[in-house]
Image (cartoon, rainbow, N blue to C red):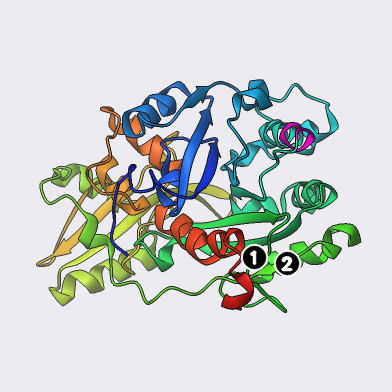
Amino acid sequence: MPIRHDPAANAGAAFTACEFFAGGGLAGLGLTGFRTILANDIDAAKARAFRANHPETSLIHADVWAVTPDQVPGAPDLCWASSPCQDVSLAGARGGLKAQRSGAFWGFWKLMQGLDAEGRAPPVIVLENVVGLLTSGEGQDFAAVCGAMAEAGYTVGALEIDAGLWLPQSRPRLFIVAMRGVEGPRLPAPAQPFHSSRLIAAWERLPEAAKANWAWWRLAVPPRRNLDLAAVLEAEAPCFSEAETHTLLTMLSPLHRARLEALKASGERRVGAAFRRVRTKDGEKLQRLEMRFDGLAGCLRTPSGGSSRQYVVIVEGGRVAMRRLTGREAARLMGVDDAYRLPASESAALKLMGDAVAVPVVDALARGLFLPALSGQAEAAA
């Protein structure tokens, strides 16, 4: 799939969408066939990035708890929520906290309930989150989200999707999709690759009421990816000095060092990715450098600490060069081209992309699931 950035592509789309926890607006870029009529994010830097790239879309820069139904125009066909992973907590649902951090999803859900009370609830609601939601709170968080949607009359299902099927980045994410009044393409039983064993295990733990309103959504597997990490790198990005590279390489475990030495001996040019990780050996914590040369970058993260910063490793002619992954490369790994306007700060750009959703994954969901449901073609596609 080509990497692209065209915020005006959906200007005349028949269906409308609202994007919550919008960040830089990458979900909206992927929602093929949908015109984004409203976005919301609490983060000031992300709000600036959104406005720079989507000047035509109304943005509410505020806590989602402060957004009211009267601020949502019309009756949106779809509402998307890329809720922060630490914010899907039962504390918000129980009202135990005012919940700027612990219950952001429930602020979003409160808004959906408000729209429902006015007869403007969206027929499609999507929650994107980390796969850890399946097991957080001993499974209670996932059950609470699905239960709330089912109680509101929605048919609920989930897919675990790795952006690595489209892009050279390993990025598994969970997509909970709820539909009401429309029928999305579904399967009679779970199937790989989008219904993993851990998703099935989480489904088995759901209350019977949620299971009764469950669907195994069907999504076509994309053609084999022909893009690798080397293809998205900036050719002129400067590498570390030999001394800096040597210091990092001293952190390799014996296994990773052996693999690197074998690549050096081959004389081939190979491009890989690396992270620093804290590992425990014989009760002692050690900082390790872990490399991969499978054509994929590791999952992008926000650069909150040294272990979150990803390195590019270039092995060529028996030598090793290293440098940090750039913000532009991170954007390419999320599925947007160089027309996308990044923050001037590398750290801010990496944070923006580390918190984002991969554009081709959203595009696949829109084309394969959301549009067939809303256009009444799900039965024909089955």
What's the residue at 81%, 67% (across, down)? 204
Q: Which residue is mark 1?
A: 184
**Image height check: is 29 above or below 44?**
below
- Is residue 242 one of those drawn in magenta? no
Residue type, numbered disc 2: Ala
Q: Which residue is mark 2?
A: 215
Q: Nearer the viewer, mark 1 or mark 2?
A: 1
**Image height check: is 149 above or below 189?**
above
- Mark 1 vs mark 2: which is more N-terminal? 1
Residue type, numbered disc 1: Gly
**Residue 130, percent across and down?**
58, 50
* Location of residue 75 (image quadrant): top right
Asked if disc 1 and disc 2 are in contact, CB closer than 8 Å, the reply is: yes
Q: Nearer the viewer, residue 75 or 169?
A: 75
**Image height check: is 260 above or below 243?**
below
Left or right: residue 159 compared with residue 338: right
What's the residue at 81%, 61% (across, down)? 213
Q: Nearer the viewer, residue 203 or 375?
A: 375
Give the overall secondary structure of the magenta segment: helix
Left or right: residue 187 compared with residue 21: right
Left or right: residue 175 compared with residue 12: right
The stretch in magenta equals 114-118
